[in-house]
């Protein structure tokens, strides 16, 4: 409980605001094989010196993610800044799981990236997990609205045969 309280203080002091106070904070299961996407809220350091980041995911959770060596290298190079949209996925390298990080631009720019939004909408429709508009506030609410809008556009295109 103390760790969660400390991380909430770190978030309040040094990062971008989370979209909604109702979003739960939890540690990331290192086996996120399906991957997660979201915007970086803040980076912090625990008392033992271990670095971490807090990620507001598109699945409406805030994950605390311990930095990997690769993440630390990217941070040292000036990347993985707050409000950057990233995709994290576990990949096997030499038989060992490794958390791969892909930066996709600013969190604001992803809201206007039609190609990304359409691809995401298709994937979510196939899985049957399209987000609900109006459920969340802030950036996350805007993200869900953009994905639903892209899904609606795809539905119109399928009916008319346009845009393929």
Image (cartoon, rainbow, N blue to C red):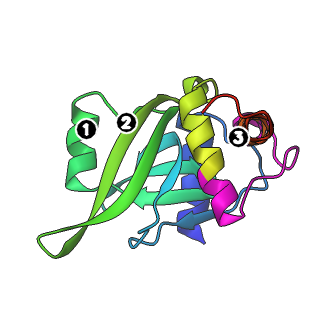
| Residue 38 percent coordinates (x, y) | 55, 45
**Element type at marker 1?**
helix
Q: Quadrant of residue 7?
A: bottom right
Q: CA distance from mark 1 to mark 2?
A: 7 Å
Q: Is residue 107 left or right of residue 51?
A: right
Q: Which mark is residue 109?
A: none
Where is residue 154? Give x, y as percent.
Answer: 72, 38
Measured in 3D between alpha carbons, the distance from the residue under mark 1 to the one under mark 3, in whole angstroms, is: 28 Å
Is the residue under label 2 in contact with that under label 1 (CB below 8 Å)? yes
Residue at the spot 63% in from the left edge and 23% down from the top edge:
112
Any part of residue 28 in sight: yes
Viewer-nearest residue: 96 or 74: 96
Q: Are marks 1 and 3 in contact (CB under 8 Å)?
A: no
Foreground mark, 2 or 3, reads 3
Q: What residue does disc 3 label?
A: 147
Residue at horizontal 28%, vertical 27%? 78
Q: Earlier in the sequence, mark 1 or mark 3?
A: 1
In this rendering, is residue 39 above or below 79? Answer: below
| Spatial separation of the CA atoms under disc 2 and disc 3 | 23 Å
- Circle 1 is placed at which residue position? 74
Q: Residue furthest front?
A: 161
Q: Seen from this angle, which residue lies furthest bottom? A: 95
Label 2: how many Cα within 10 Å (few below 14, some 14–19, many 20+) = many
Q: Front-most of 21 and 47?
A: 21
Count the marks.
3
Residue 48 point in image, percent of width and height: 31, 62
- Identify the magenta region: 123-145
The stretch drawn in magenta includes residue 133? yes
Mark number displayed over residue 80: 2
């Amino acid at each position: 409980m103390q760790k969660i309280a400390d991380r909430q203080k770190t978030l309040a002091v040094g990062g971008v605001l989370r979209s909604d106070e109702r979003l739960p904070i939890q540690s990331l299961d290192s086996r996120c094989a399906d991957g997660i996407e979201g915007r970086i809220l803040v980076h912090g350091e625990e008392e033992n010196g271990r670095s971490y980041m807090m990620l507001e995911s598109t699945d409406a959770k805030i994950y605390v993610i311990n930095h990997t060596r690769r993440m630390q290298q990217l941070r040292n190079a000036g990347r993985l800044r707050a409000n950057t949209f990233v995709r994290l996925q576990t990949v096997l390298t030499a038989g060992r799981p490794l958390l791969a990080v892909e930066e996709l631009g600013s969190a604001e720019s992803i809201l206007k990236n039609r190609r990304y939004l359409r691809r995401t909408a298709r994937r979510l429709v196939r899985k049957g997990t399209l987000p609900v508009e109006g459920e969340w506030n802030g950036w996350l609410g805007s993200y869900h609205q953009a994905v639903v809008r892209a899904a609606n556009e795809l539905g119109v295109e399928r009916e008319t045969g346009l845009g393929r």
